[in-house]
Image (spheres, grey):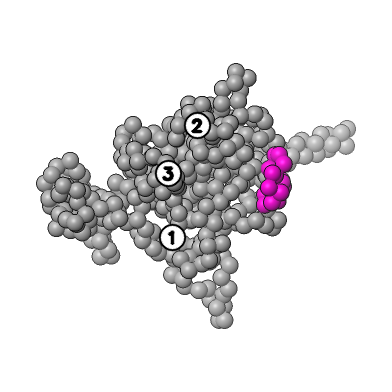
Amino acid sequence: MKMKNLGLVFRTLSAVVLLSGCGILGGKKSKGGTGLANDGQLHGVAPGSKYVLPKPPGMVYVPQGYFHMGPSDEDPAYAFSARNRTVSVSGFWMDATEVTNNEYRQFVYWVRDSVVARKLGYVKADKEGIERVDWTKMKTIKWGDPKVIEQLSTTDIILQPDDRIFGKKEIDPSKIIFHSEVFDLKAAAKAAKNADGTTPPRSKFIVKYDLPIYPDTLVWIRDYTYSYNEPMAKRYFSHPAFGNYPVVGVSWKQATAFCEWRTHYLNAYLNGKKRPQESDFHLPTEAQWEYAARAGRSQTMYPWGNYYLRNKKGCLLANFKPGRGNYPEDGGFYTVRADSYWPNDFGLYCMSGNVAEWTSSIYYEGRNNFQHDMNPDVRWNAGKDDPPLMKRKVIRGGSWKDVGYYLQNGTSTYEYQDTSKSYIGFRCVIDLPAAPPKGSGGR
């Protein structure tokens, strides 16, 4: 009888261990805080107040998973630059659509206001004497008021007289410059310790640079010889009719700067609410992009889950160059709204077609031969003096001017990081946990 009871106890304990190992049972919540009485016991200290996940608006959660990365069909060039392999990807949030003109304009206006604030002296020093923009004063500026432009006419942010048409005073787009400061974690991780065993100074891994961030609207003319595209050059970024269309004319560097600004913008808000800082927004890695595009359909050719560019009714499923060049057949001549067509199973729009998309990965023909199978990522922060070969970045998804081959989930190509095109945009990702169920009160 005792042996029988002992066996029952053992099976019960085994079940508890098994359930805990599978993540079904959770442990006790740490009380945390520094206000606990000193009783000589370990209680833990939380880094901040109760965590409330800020569900990013306009983004969808891509759950962790495992998939076959690479071509789902024959490589017509026989280049073998993207061989098929199995990889695992952790969960992340991704923009449901490509970043739109309206969204990028928010970035442009923020940088513009920051530059103007310093020109007008609308700054205030913090406790350490560092000058910060006084946003309270900046809110009083009305950009439609001619007096504001007249006030700025003495600064170099307004077009010089020789550059004006009929004397109209306008802001010089080349003066809208974003100041970037990032910490290079990979460089810091690989750095060797000093001879005395100390680590190199933190300043050695801080990268600073200034970058004009206004989109290059002339790409609509520059990209196509003997083609009439002047209306798009004049209107695409500035006219409200294109507000929800994907932004183009943005280089890889500008897209990266947008992600950096978006991170600061979010964390500044969280800091004001005394909430924990979050992960950085960034361009998706090549593996993240392809995993998100496939949406759990590992071996399919396109994001919608089959091997064809049309549905059973004969309707085209993306914005690209069908047939021999019937551009309007799919419903769009150039780009279309960023939320056009049906989303894939993850809720992501236009992962194929419309505009190709920047990734954070360097384009190197043999990159798939040595990447890790866990969150594969091959990056190189190319400097100004690096050879062009090191400045190639992977672009994915194909665009409105591409044939169907470039729309395939496994097709990768490249563009240089300091160039901009009328057919390349981007979307952001951020590494946050999945949102808690409604009514759970956060985590």
- Numbered tag placed on residue 327 in the rendering: 2
User: Between tags 2 and 3, which lies in front?
Assistant: 3
- Numbered tag placed on residue 226 in the rendering: 3
What amino acid is labelled 1 in the image? Val
- Report if residue 72 lies within the magenta region: yes
> Looking at the image, do the residues carrying marks 2 and 3 touch, with CB atoms under 8 Å apart?
no
User: Between tags 3 and 1, which lies in front?
Assistant: 3
Q: Please give the range of residues in magenta.
A: 71-86
Number of residues whose C-alpha sits closer than 10 Å to that of mark 3, classed few (under 14), some (14–19) or many (20 or more):
few
Percent x, y of residue 279: 48, 49
> Looking at the image, do the residues carrying marks 3 and 1 touch, with CB atoms under 8 Å apart?
no
Indicate which disc, 3 or 1, sits on the residue closer to the N terminus.
Answer: 1
Q: Is residue 41 above or below residue 298?
A: below
Q: Considering the numbered disc 1 on the image, is that residue within a helix, a strand or a loop?
A: strand
Residue bearing mark 1? 182
Percent x, y of residue 81: 67, 52
Percent x, y of residue 412: 61, 47
Number of residues whose C-alpha sits closer than 10 Å to that of mark 1, classed few (under 14), some (14–19) or many (20 or more):
few
What amino acid is labelled 3 in the image? Tyr
Rendering quarter of residue 299: top right
What amino acid is labelled 2 in the image? Tyr
Percent x, y of residue 108: 32, 47
Question: Spatial distance from mark 2 to mark 3, Cα to Cα?
Answer: 17 Å
